[in-house]
Each structure stands twice: as structure tokens, then as C-alpha cells.
Amino acid sequence: MKTPFGWLAERVTLTPRALRWGTTAALVVSILIIVTGGVVRVTGSGLGCPTWPACETGSLTTTPELGIHGLIEFTNRALTGVLIAAVGWAIVAARLQKPRDRTMTRLAWSQFWLVVVNALAGGVTVLSELNPYIVAMHFVLAIALLTTTTLTWHRAHRGQSADVAFPRAVGGLAWALVVVTAVLILVGTLVTGSGPHAGDSADVPRMAFVWEQVTVVHGVLGTATLVLGIVLLVALQRIPGAQLARRRALTFVVVVVLQALLGVGQALLGLPEWMVVLHLLGSALVWVGVLRVLLDVHP
């Protein structure tokens, strides 16, 4: 029995360009929703919509009584609709390619299911009244979504990548860089969960860590990430034809340096809201960057 997509694929074909645009849209919006989630946190709007899935009892959308916090929280929720549209575009474009790439189709569908899981996690976050561990889980799931949108984007654009044979040691370095970066981001959720930006103006519980101590651990991991990135960049200098991978690695190192400067700056200045949001954007770009380095070394 044919599915509706199977029936449509026999009659309609979309160009690789449509797929590239669809995967790009999904990637951009998955980054944007991390940033708007940061805005919700630093403005204390996490419970701006006090219930879920409705914004408040009897109203799916925000109301004037909920004020600016309700508007900010509802805007972040509404962005999920934009994300679904972008992911839907990627799914349709992937399925209507000829010849069919089943891996691409599966990757596109994985984005959809992660959007659903993220939406449910957002609901649990509100219903738990911003439990810091659930908030951290929600962010990790957003990073998981960002991973799939990055993988899908890369596969849609891989025809533009150079075909280079990389030594096994370079591949090992790339994997080590990904692992350390992942731990860096996970520890970053502990820094946030024990810090002052609880996500709401009410008395929200925090993680039972000493903020200064986890911040130091986060900084050490950031330094390790930077050192590994530089080592990988130096190793790539010796490989003929690896210009694209070198550019990716250089871009990653630059983004990590900027992210580190931003992190130090926000700690010294008392965590101003705008710097926290920029640091969240930086974490998303760092993760996309390290995945692109890995994917260029393992095409």
C-alpha cells in the first residue's frame, strides 16, 4: 500500500536546490528557537504562560492580563509552528528527490519527531514550574534537534564538499573534539541551572551546585575544546586538498574564542541579560561548527 508521499513522489520531483533551501530553513529556525528560549529565561518569562498547551486556562494565546511576559513566552511557543513548517518543507523536499535518498528522508523525519519531543518537554517544563533539571533537559533536546538539522543540511550540501582521504588520527581528533564540546555544553546547563537567571521572577528552585565551581569546570572544558580545535587545525595544514576542512576548523576556533571572551565578560559583568542570550547563540554556533568539522573529515 502506497503512502501519500509515495503517491506524490511518482508524480512530482523537486530539485536539489529546494532540498537545500528546506534544510537551511530548518537549521536556521532550530538555532533561532534556542535564542528565543534564552530570551524567555533572562526576561523571567518562563511562566508568562502559566499552563500548557494553552497559554492560560481558556485561552490558547496570550492575553493582555499576562503582560509582556506572556507575550514573550507565547512568541517562543509560536515559533515552534515556524519550525514545523521549515521541517515539513525539508521532509517533502527530501521525499520528492530522484533518485530517492532514504537516509536523507529518515534524517528529515527525525527532525519532526524531535520537534514533537521538544514541544512536550516545553510543556513539562512549564507544568513543573521550571524545575532546573527539566529546563536543562529541554535545552539538551533542543541541541539534539540542532544536531539533526545540521546533519540533514550537510547531507543536502555534501555535493559541494571536496573528496579528500583523511588519516585515521585526524578522524580521531575530530571525534575527540565533538565529545569534549558535547561535555562542555552539558556542563553549561549546570552553570545556567545554578546561576541567577531562573527563568521567572518568582522563587524558582536552582540546582544544588556552587555556581563559581561549575563555572570554573566549564571554563576548563572550554579551554580544552579550544586547544583540541587548534591541534586539529594544525594537523589539517599537512593534508593536501583539505582546504574546506581547514576553513571549517579555523571558523570553529574563531567562534570558540569569541564564545570564551563572551563567557568571561558576562561572568565579570554580573551576567547581563543580553550577553547571556548571545552566549546561548554562541553555544548553538559552536555545536554546529564542531559537527561541520567532523562531517568534513568524515564525508
Image (cartoon, grey):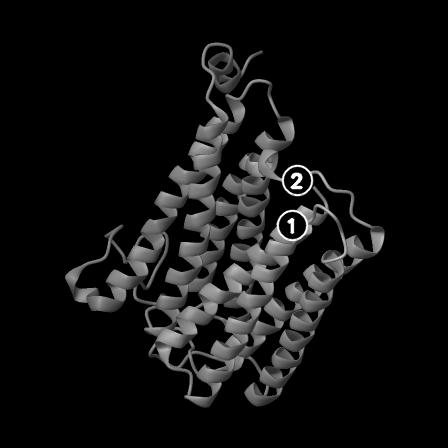
Examine the rendering and report whether any part of residue 139 can be seen: no
Tag 2 near tag 1, CB within 8 Å: yes
Q: Residue 47: x and y, percent?
A: 34, 67
Q: Is residue 77 above or below residue 64?
A: above
Q: Is residue 194 above or below residue 184?
A: below
Q: Is residue 37 above or below residue 9?
A: below
Q: Residue 49: x and y, percent?
A: 30, 62
Q: Give the residue number, with chain letter if any, for mark 1.
A: 243
Quadrant location of the N terminus in the rendered image = top right
- Quadrant position of residue 274: bottom left
Name which residue type carries label 2.
Answer: Ala
Q: Residue at x 50, y 27 (%)?
A: 16
Q: Is residue 159 left or right of residue 261?
A: right
Q: Residue 44: x and y, percent?
A: 34, 74
**How many residues crowd mark 1 within 10 Å: few (<14), some (14–19), many (20+)?**
some
Pick whichever, 63 or 293, lies toward us. 293
Name which residue type carries label 1.
Answer: Gln
